[in-house]
Image: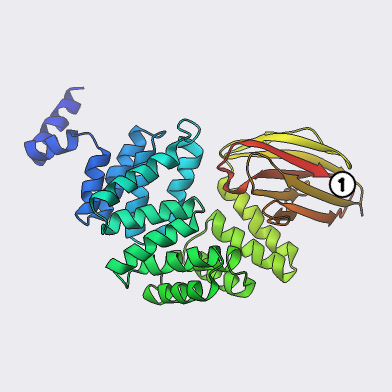
């Protein structure tokens, strides 16, 4: 104990009273926003990370950190933080999205040309699938800064996702030229060419660049899986669906076996995957379909007894997973199901034909 007091005293002498006073100040969202406004985005990320650690069920820390990440070009990290809003904040504060939008509306009313506010607000709209609203804000952003990489890229994405093909492609391609080495840029392009203007070859190429650039994320693997399904290669798609599960799973819950002709509803939560035994005879076709009234996007993967992924589904019927696979041997297989990225809560219905 005496030694510890000596070390602390020495530390006081080294850091000095000013540094110590700064270290003792609590982190706040206001400080984080001030760092953004002064262009110190990495410092803002640190400040908002501290806010999140102190208040993990409050939206402002995630919102602010995402805004700083967007301004750093870290679009995948920003999306991950909004995913955390879905998983951690919305169950406690169902009005979290409205809170974010109201905050941005107030900031833009005070300063309509604010680059950080236009960036953050447009991304929030994009996250909420409000592509028309996002496009309106991105128009304002590009009026202030025409060569903004984020602005061009996300206006292109928003336009493609709402069907404005020619203008969207032009924006998207220009956005890529502004930061061709960014894996985050190629992820957004791959997303747009998967869910906006379907081009599996282009989506596959963009997602591969993103993955090779370090974005080993559930969304990148979803794009690659969708591309392989379009190519008619379900086995290759299954590899990426399995990786999606590996990245999102924090809990595996067991359910009752599912026989042919039966259905059952399973409870899904953030990070929660449900595993259902699927007994089958050799040569029998295992036909699985999923649906839900609580969330529109599901994923599923079928594992052999040794844990090898043998088939899977994602976006097969709309955004619901469904697949058919002939059992290679008489055995009890294991079906794992969850919502996309395992962020949402609710009941997921699994049916076996």
Q: Residue at x 54, y 72 (%)?
A: 165
> Does 64 sit left or right of 27 as displayed?
right
| Element assignment for label 1 | loop
Q: Pick whichever, 330 or 292, lies toward us.
A: 292
Residue with the mark numbered 1: 353
| Relative vertical location of residue 262 with respect to residue 300 in this rendering, above or below | above
Residue 282 is left or right of residue 273, and the answer is right
| Quarter of the rendering occupied by the N terminus | top left
Q: Which residue is drawn at 18% across and 34% down?
A: 25
| Residue at point 63%, 35% (across, down) | 346
Instruction: Tell me residue 155's x, y (percent).
Output: 43, 66
Near mark 1 (Cα within 10 A), the count class, few <14, some 14-19 or many ≥20, is few
Q: Is residue 331 above or below residue 11?
A: below
For residue 180, above or below residue 288: below
The residue sitting at the top extreme is 1
Front residue of 142/33: it is 142
Image quadrant in which you'd find residue 194 = bottom right
Q: In the image, what residue occupies the spot 34% across and 52% down?
A: 67
Q: Where is residue 323 in the image (x, y as percent from the top left)?
A: 78, 54
Count of marks, rendered view: 1
Colouring of the image = rainbow
Confirm whether residue 172 shows in the render.
Answer: yes
Residue 170 pos. (x, y %): 46, 77
Q: Is residue 62 visible?
A: no
* Above or below: residue 313 compared with residue 58: below
The image shows residue 224 at horizontal and vertical percentages of 61, 64
Task: Tell me: 223 left or right of 32.
Answer: right
């Amino acid at each position: 104990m005496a030694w510890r007091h000596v070390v602390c005293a020495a530390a006081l002498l080294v850091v000095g009273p000013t540094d110590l006073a700064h270290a003792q100040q609590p982190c706040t969202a206001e400080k984080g926003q001030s760092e953004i406004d002064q262009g110190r985005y990495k410092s803002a990320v640190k400040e908002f990370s501290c806010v999140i650690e102190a208040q993990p069920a409050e939206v402002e820390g995630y919102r602010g950190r995402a805004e700083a990440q967007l301004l750093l070009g870290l679009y995948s990290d920003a999306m991950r933080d909004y995913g955390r809003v879905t998983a951690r904040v919305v169950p406690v504060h169902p009005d979290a999205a409205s809170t974010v939008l109201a905050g941005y509306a107030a900031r833009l009313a005070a300063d309509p040309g604010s680059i950080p506010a236009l960036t953050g607000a447009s991304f929030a709209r994009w996250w909420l699938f409000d592509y028309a609203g996002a496009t309106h804000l991105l128009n304002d952003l590009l009026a202030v800064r025409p060569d903004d990489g984020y602005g061009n890229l996300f206006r292109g994405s928003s336009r493609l996702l709402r069907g404005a093909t020619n203008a969207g492609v032009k924006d998207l391609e220009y956005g890529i030229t502004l930061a061709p080495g960014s894996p985050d840029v190629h992820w957004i392009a791959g997303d747009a060419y998967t869910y906006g203007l379907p081009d599996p070859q282009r989506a596959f190429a963009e997602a591969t660049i993103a993955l090779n650039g370090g974005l080993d994320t559930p969304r990148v693997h979803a794009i690659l899986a969708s591309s392989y399904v379009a190519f008619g290669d379900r086995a290759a798609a299954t590899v990426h669906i399995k990786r999606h599960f590996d990245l999102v799973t924090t809990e595996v819950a067991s359910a009752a076996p599912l026989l042919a002709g039966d259905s059952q509803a399973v409870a899904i939560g953030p990070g929660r995957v449900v595993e259902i035994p699927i007994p089958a005879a050799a040569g029998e076709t295992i036909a699985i379909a999923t649906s839900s009234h609580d969330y529109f996007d599901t994923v599923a993967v079928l594992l052999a007894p040794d844990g090898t992924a043998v088939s899977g589904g994602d976006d097969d019927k709309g955004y619901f997973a469904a697949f058919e696979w002939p059992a290679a041997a008489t055995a009890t297989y294991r079906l794992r199901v969850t919502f996309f990225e395992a962020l949402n809560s609710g009941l997921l219905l699994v049916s076996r034909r």
